[in-house]
Image: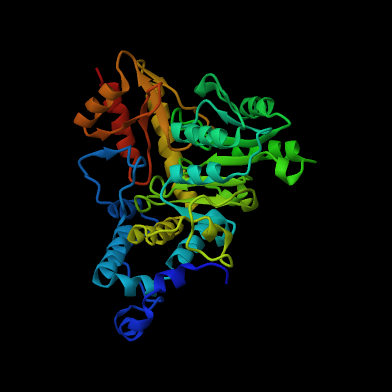
């Protein structure tokens, strides 16, 4: 093996304590505690897993997730083990990251080798755009709707490589956005020398969900006949579709997708991943602890000591979503989002921003209230027991996110509360 593998690194210095380790370390295959009676098909049981304040309606829980019980329990179990004997626990759990990548692949589609572990969507964007091999005679295309972290990561790539970045509006009015128009506008922006197409699956600024599969199909035609080093690579910030939409990432058709697992997946805070099918186009940016004979995703996972109790507990977040069912979760979110949009649209003082079409939206629902800025609206809503958020962009909208921690009855209360704003 070339290089120092993760297990070798974490095991360094333990040889002289081998006897002690054998006595004090739990086996790598230790069984997790048996779960209490839980029916994943009962939405009340699902909601009971979360310690959220029941006096409030949490339509901003997706911003930075609360930990459901299986995730909390896993974090605490790992924390206790690390605190009791850090070296022994690390050595005993040398395979934990591989198990997380396997759990991720089971949910994402594809293989564990395609998954690199990160701390957030933003870290994934940084690793991606700082490592992509792009020539000065090539360029990148993105949209005007993307989050500042995406724009900044692309701008850094431009300064590093000399390749310019162009931004295009994919729609003028979010409510009137269509799949055909989005694809046509993006296609018109792609030049013969375009190397990077950077887009966001669901825009946190408007709630518009891009037709990534249709964009990928369009790019497949663009790339026909291009050499590998000239292909336009489809790079996706997937955080507001991941865990909220019923589609395997491997089926989207993109080359790379970065996401946090601490939003709609309700995974441990401070965790994320970068999924790739085209790792050969990328150079590692942060040194890894993985050896050269380890999977590609592992080689792009930044080395160093992390908050392992959180990272290793990502497995439980994926396990919980699989128990409940990705399709059922997506349907639960879509039903409530549609209910919310219909209710908001019926209020004369409210202008809905997000498309009605569930194929062009997901869980994020944005609107504005006549004569009231979004921050004032969130304060009044919170005083009435509704937790909402504000879009972190120059154009600020009131934003809601129905999810597995909300109910249809609560959504009716949200609509009634918005109707009472003054």
Q: Is residue 282 visible?
A: yes
Q: Where 209 falls versus 275 (above or below)?
A: above
Residue 235 pos. (x, y %): 58, 41
Question: What residue sits 50% from the left and 23% below the top?
Answer: 175
Q: Is residue 228 left or right of residue 358?
A: right
Please determine whether, in this image, residue 240 is positioned above or below residue 377.
below
Specify the farthest residue to the right.
225
Residue at the image point whose x is 38% and y is 53% from the top: 267
Q: Position of residue 49 (x, y in %)?
A: 29, 55
Describe residue 345's horizontal placement relative to residue 277 as left or right.
left
Name the residue furthest top.
Answer: 371
Q: Could you tell me if residue 248 is visible in this image?
A: no
Q: Indicate how the structure is coloured in the image.
A: rainbow
> Where is residue 226, by image quadrant?
top right
Q: Residue at x 57, y 30 (%)?
A: 142
Q: Is 315 in front, or is 24?
A: 24
**How many callouts does the rendering have?**
0
Which residue occupies the extreme bottom position in the image?
19
Residue 90, horizontal then vertical, whole percent: 36, 70
Q: Is residue 93 left or right of residue 201?
A: left
Quadrant (top left, top right, bottom left, bottom right) of the N terminus: bottom right
Figure quadrant of the C terminus = top left
Q: Is residue 65 above or below residue 198?
A: below
Relative depth, front residue between 144 and 158? 158
């Amino acid at each position: 093996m070339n290089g120092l593998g993760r297990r070798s690194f974490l095991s360094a210095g333990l040889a002289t304590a081998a006897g002690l380790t054998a006595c004090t370390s739990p086996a790598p295959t230790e069984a997790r505690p048996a779960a209490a009676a839980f029916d994943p098909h009962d939405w009340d049981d699902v909601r009971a897993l979360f310690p959220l304040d029941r006096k409030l309606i949490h339509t901003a829980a997706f911003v930075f997730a609360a930990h459901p019980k299986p995730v909390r329990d896993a974090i605490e179990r790992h924390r206790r083990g690390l605190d009791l004997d850090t070296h022994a626990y690390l050595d005993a759990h040398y395979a934990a990251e591989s198990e997380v990548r396997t759990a991720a692949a089971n949910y994402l589609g594809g293989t564990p080798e395609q998954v690199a572990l990160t701390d957030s969507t933003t870290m994934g964007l940084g690793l991606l755009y700082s490592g992509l091999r792009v020539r000065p005679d090539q360029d990148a295309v993105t949209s005007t709707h993307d989050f500042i972290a995406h724009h900044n990561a692309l701008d850094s790539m431009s300064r590093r490589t000399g390749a310019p970045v162009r931004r295009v509006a994919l729609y003028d009015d979010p409510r009137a956005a269509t799949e055909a128009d989005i694809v046509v506008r993006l296609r018109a922006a792609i030049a013969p020398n375009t190397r990077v197409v950077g887009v966001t699956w669901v825009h946190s600024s408007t709630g518009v969900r891009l037709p990534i599969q249709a964009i990928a199909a369009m790019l497949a035609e663009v790339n026909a006949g291009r050499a590998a080093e000239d292909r336009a690579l489809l790079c996706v910030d997937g955080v507001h579709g991941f865990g909220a939409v019923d589609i395997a990432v491997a089926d989207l058709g993109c080359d790379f997708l970065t996401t946090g697992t601490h939003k709609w997946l309700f995974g441990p805070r401070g965790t994320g991943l970068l999924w790739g099918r085209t790792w050969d186009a990328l150079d590692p940016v942060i040194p890894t602890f993985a050896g050269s004979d380890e999977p590609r995703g592992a080689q792009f996972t930044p080395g160093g000591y992390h908050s392992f109790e959180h990272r290793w507990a990502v497995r439980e977040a994926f396990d919980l979503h699989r128990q409940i069912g990705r399709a059922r979760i997506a349907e639960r979110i879509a039903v409530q989002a549609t209910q919310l949009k219909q209710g908001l649209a019926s209020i004369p003082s409210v202008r809905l921003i997000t498309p009605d079409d569930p194929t062009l939206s997901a869980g994020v629902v944005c609107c504005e209230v006549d004569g009231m800025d979004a921050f004032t609206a969130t304060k009044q809503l919170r005083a009435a027991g509704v937790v909402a958020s504000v879009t972190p962009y120059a154009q600020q909208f009131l934003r809601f996110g129905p999810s597995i921690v909300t109910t249809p009855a609560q959504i009716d209360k949200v609509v009634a509360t918005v109707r009472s704003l003054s």
